[in-house]
Amino acid sequence: MHKLLFMSFLLFEAAFIKLYAQDEKLLLQKVKEKYDKVNDYVAEGKLKTNVIFIKAPVSNVKVYYKKPDKMKIKNEKGVSFIPKGVVNININEVLSLQHYEAISSGTSRIGNTECRVIKIFPLRDEENITRATLYVDENRHVILKSVISTREEGTYELLMSYNRYVTYGLPDKVQLSFNTREYKLPKGITMDYDNGAKTPDPKNMQNRKGKVEITYSGYVINQGVSDNVFQ
Amino acid sequence: MFVSLLRLEIYKIFRRPRTYIAFGAITVIVLLIQLALKVNGTDFIRLYTDTQTDIFEIPYENILNGYFVCVMVLHMILIHVPLLVALIAGDMISGEAAAGTLRLIAAKPISRTRLILAKFAASSLYVVALLLWMAVFALAGSILIFGTGDLLVFKETEMHLMKQTDVFWRFLAAFAFAALALTAIAAMAILFSVFSENSLGPIVTTVCVVIVFTIMQQLKVPLFEKWINPWSLTAHMLGWKGFFYVEKNEEGVTLDGSVENPWAVLQSALILTGYIVLFLMISVYYFRKKDILS
């Protein structure tokens, strides 16, 4: 009798989890439908870099995107340090996963918005993404925050805020956090002038967070983007 | 009287074939660096950015512009230019002594102080001419070959990026500072020249002093760093680089027109000026007493 009860409980639990996971997947499907409205875009924005060993001005960048996973950020007139994660990791890549498990991890507030937290685990070994945590605004069906771990590019945290292009699921501002690496050149190469300014200690650079922020001024959506742009 | 004396000294400098060795050497070195960077510039930048290629997209083509090439040329060349300055300034008095003309010019109705000052002024003008030549080839030439763009400067543990609209004035300031630094070398070479009867001694001594202090600066020994480097001529000569180090705000964004710790650059300029005055004073003091009859 006890055995039967225990078995029934397990079956109920499994069915409940499955139903709940389906609920998460349904929400992600709605988010994806919104993103799917965009086949391509060209956006102009301002890029701000905050990395311990880089001193850089705000630069003007152009962001090109084409379905399913082509993305390019260009500073045509100047120099910008763009983390590879911005280019290689985009939300669409997560939402386009075919085989994955989605687990609810409760709710969390991002700014003033209550978000559903969904953890995603790809089931296939060949995926570049090893796991992702998405913070989904259930009302607007957009992702406000994502923490994506990859095999090759490490872990990236994306924070997005929406306004004018929310109907397309396109953010007005993206903030990317990533782990930095030590930057140190041999003294003999640089022959620095010692101006007494405090310089970063290379030991502290390892695994420190760097941040890059892109504030978009406007998008041109679904007007076609040449493949040459991405080469 | 001083102006005509100065004219005479300038004439003497530019009449000597060895004067043009410096101009020729600078032309060849600059052209070689430009050629090397034109052919292999991307690999050169990769040397500096190698540790970051996994994290960042490095825009090699945009980094490699005329401003970047000019900074690299100055970085490679300016530590060797003291040799070229010493070649002329170290010969100013001792060369006359060796040729037997020192007695002749000292017999003129001009004070020995003026004579030293005229020779120093002529050497300084030679330094300025050398830097102008360098500016034409290194800056204008590089802009012509590589174009303009944002300037990236590599430090030991930092990268400083400046907008192209915020760069040109920095070059003007850097060249002005380099003129001051090389004038200090000229003053030192004249000082050694006063004590010598042949040209080779002051030239070699000046070069040796520069080499010894540069090595002490590179060794980073705490004793040297505490007691010698703060007063080292060669350490302050690098002050031109200070104009290419920028300040950033709390968000990590650089401030246009800023110089990281401008007081340090000013202090270096003052120390170099102090050396010039000191070297000239000793030169004048000794030269006034110098026995030129023997």
Image: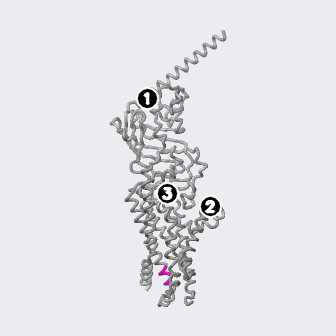
Which residue matches tag 3? B246
Picture coordinates of residue B151, whole percent (x, y)? 45, 55
Under circle 3, the secondary element is: loop
Asked if the stretch drawn in magenta spans residue B115, the answer is yes
Query: For the residues carrying marks 2 and 1, which lies nearer the camera in this image?
Result: 2
The magenta span reads B113-119
CB under 8 Å between discs 3 and 1: no
**Which residue type carries mark 1?**
Lys
How crowded pointer 2 is (Cα within 10 Å; few <14, some 14-19, many 20+) is rated as few
Do pointers 3 and 1 mark residues of a single chain?
A: no
User: Image point 65% across, 62% down: which residue?
Assistant: B222
B99 or B102: nearer the eye?
A: B99
Find residue B220 and name its label.
2
Pinpoint the chain carrying mark 1: A
Question: Can residue B44 be spotted in the picture?
Answer: yes
Pick whichever of labels 3 and 2 is earlier in the sequence.
2
- In what quadrant of the picture does the C terminus of chain A appear? top left
